[in-house]
Image (cartoon, rainbow, N blue to C red):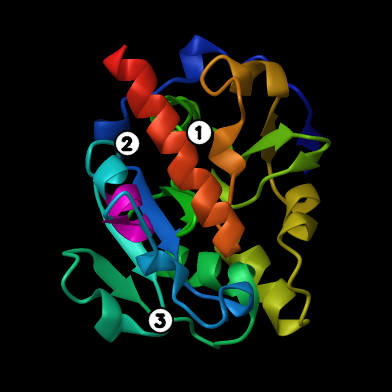
């Protein structure tokens, strides 16, 4: 079906996210090897767990929140819908597919559990402009960011086919579906420092995130 690069999104395509019923799907899988086995979802920044920061943001943006995890007991007190991978060990593609199948919404915003600086205005922009597309993905730093985007239920059959072939590369689904890439210029209107794509993968990342939040708080206080 092809792809469109660096589009200018038309206001005529916008939909009210509360009426369109966009859900949020947070992927909380992975082996956390660079964190020495510590569950990244529960790492804390200024006393708040990463998963809690994301859930707090999505409470205001999405109709429902789904957490995809193969350790549901850890998340049972978060008051969200919990879903397990159909076949564990197949990475984010399986996580996205499992989340989409469990969602009652046609459109779903996908993110990973370790992205505490994902920008609410950028999320809202993508949610409001998703109608008519199968996938909406940011394009920044010369690469796409598949774990920060909107996916429709139309993706499920393509994902199932790829998983059956053991092709786990999310980017390989883009040419097979109606995909809209959001340009750096459009992203910068909401997130000029591109912090939405910052992952907490190491202890050093966690320290840096804490320092960044301290600077933000100081700037607000001034």
Query: Disc 2 to disc 1, how far (Cα)?
Result: 10 Å
Residue lying at 39% horizontally and 64% vertically, measured from the top left? 43
Residue lying at 60% horizontally and 63% vertically, measured from the top left? 202
Q: Return the mark for residue 20.
A: 2
N-terminal-most mark, 2 or 1: 2
Side of 29 relative to 21 (left or right): right
In reply to whether residue 108 is colored magenta, the answer given is no
Q: Which residues are magenta?
A: 48-55
Q: In this figure, which residue is indicated by the disc labeled 3?
A: 84
Quadrant containing the N terminus in the rendered view: top right
Residue lying at 68% horizontally and 41% vertically, measured from the top left? 178
Residue lying at 25% horizontally and 46% vertically, measured from the top left? 56
Neighbor class of circle 2 (other Cα within 10 Å; few <14, some 14-19, many 20+) is: some
Residue 127 visible in the picture: no
Query: Disc 2 to disc 3, how far (Cα)?
Result: 25 Å
Figure check: 134 above or below 49: above
Magenta span: helix, strand or loop, mainly? helix
Side of 184 relative to 214 (left or right): right
Nearer to us of marks 2 and 3 is: 3
Residue 182 visible in the picture: yes
Quadrant containing the C terminus in the rendered view: top left
Q: x, y percentage for residue 47?
A: 26, 54
Figure check: 50 above or below 186: below
Figure check: 163 above or below 178: below
Q: Secondary structure at mark 1?
A: loop
Q: x, y percentage for residue 216?
A: 40, 26
Query: Disc 3 to disc 1, how far (Cα)?
Result: 26 Å
Neighbor class of circle 1 (other Cα within 10 Å; few <14, some 14-19, many 20+) is: many
Q: In this figure, which residue is indicated by the disc labeled 1?
A: 130
């Amino acid at each position: 079906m092809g792809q469109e690069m660096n589009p200018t999104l038309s206001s005529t395509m916008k939909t009210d996210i509360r009426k369109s019923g966009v859900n949020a799907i947070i992927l909380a899988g992975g082996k956390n090897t660079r964190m020495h086995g510590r569950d990244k979802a529960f790492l804390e920044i200024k006393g708040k767990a990463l998963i809690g920061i994301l859930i707090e943001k999505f409470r205001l943006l999405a109709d429902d929140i789904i957490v995809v995890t193969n350790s549901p007991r850890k998340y049972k007190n978060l008051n969200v819908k919990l879903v397990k991978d159909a076949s564990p060990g197949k990475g984010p593609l399986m996580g996205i597919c499992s989340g989409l199948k469990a969602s009652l919404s046609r459109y779903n915003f996908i993110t990973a559990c370790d992205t505490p600086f994902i920008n609410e205005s950028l999320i809202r922009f993508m949610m409001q402009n998703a109608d008519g597309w199968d996938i909406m993905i940011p394009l920044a730093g010369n690469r796409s960011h598949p774990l920060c985007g909107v996916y429709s239920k139309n993706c499920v059959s393509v994902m199932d086919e790829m998983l059956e072939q053991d092709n786990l590369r999310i980017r390989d689904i883009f040419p097979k579906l109606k995909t809209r890439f959001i340009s750096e210029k459009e992203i910068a209107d909401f997130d000029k420092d591109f912090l939405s794509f910052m992952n907490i993968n190491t202890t050093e990342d966690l320290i840096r995130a804490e320092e960044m939040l301290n600077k933000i708080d100081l700037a607000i206080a001034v």
